[in-house]
Amino acid sequence: MIEVGHVLVHEDVIKNDFVCNLTKCKGICCVEGDAGAPLQPKETDILRDIYPKVKPYMTAAGIKAIEEQGTHVVDADGDLTTTCVDGNKECAYVTWENGITKCAIEKAYELGEVDWKKPISCHLYPIRTTQYPEFEVLHYDRWHICHDACTFGKELGVPVYTFLKDPLIRQYGEQWYKELEQAVEAL
């Protein structure tokens, strides 16, 4: 583990390569799994507030799920997550473009409709966070559906933390990211 401020970064985040390859996986991570994307408590208010502006970019099935279940849910483990279509499959905020999943929230963001890109857990993936009272741990979440991203990352020589520079800065700030880079160089 590398300690940067109050955050412990697992070495797998540094040593493994990863670059999403949507032409291969089609964004399957947004439609597979056993629950929606993890949410921070403050993100539930954001989802509630921006839903009317995101709704035009959503699928009919996603809209139906939100209107029946709400803009977020509490999963079987008691965690806050995005709402899913048909129980625990496709995220309600998924939309499709040329056979590839796209986040309706991110689409609204790109078009200037909202000023929030998407849940931080989605933006940080394949990094997952575990919060403890005194610190936070970042770890690399290996999922078989991301095999193409691992292969592509290795071809390009891009470590997970480099691929996720923007969301890491979004979550922890530029200074924190600079300190992470310095700690990696010191390894």
Image: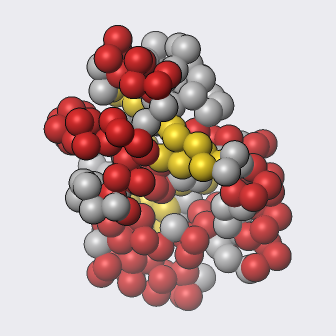
Q: Quadrant of the C terminus?
A: bottom right
Q: Nearer the viewer, residue 60 or 7?
A: 60
Horizontal arrangement in the rendering, residue 182 relative to residue 105 (left or right)? right
Residue at screen point 43% across, 36% down: 58
Horizontal arrangement in the rendering, residue 6 relative to residue 139 (left or right)? left
Residue at screen point 67% across, 51% down: 98
Q: Nearer the viewer, residue 72 or 93?
A: 93
Q: Would you say residue 11 is visible in this rendering?
A: no
Where does residue 143 sit, x and y in percent of width and height?
71, 43
Q: Nearer the viewer, residue 185 or 34?
A: 34
Where residue 179 sits, quadrant-wise, is bottom left
Q: Would you say residue 97 is visible in this rendering?
A: yes
Q: How many labels sit on residues? A: 0
Residue at screen point 37% across, 62% down: 110
Horizontal arrangement in the rendering, residue 98 relative to residue 139 (left or right)? right
Where does residue 139 sit, x and y in percent of width and height?
55, 52
Where does residue 125 sit, x and y in percent of width and height?
54, 52
Where residue 152 sits, quadrant-wise, is bottom right
Asked if 51 appears above or below 74 in the picture, the reply is: below
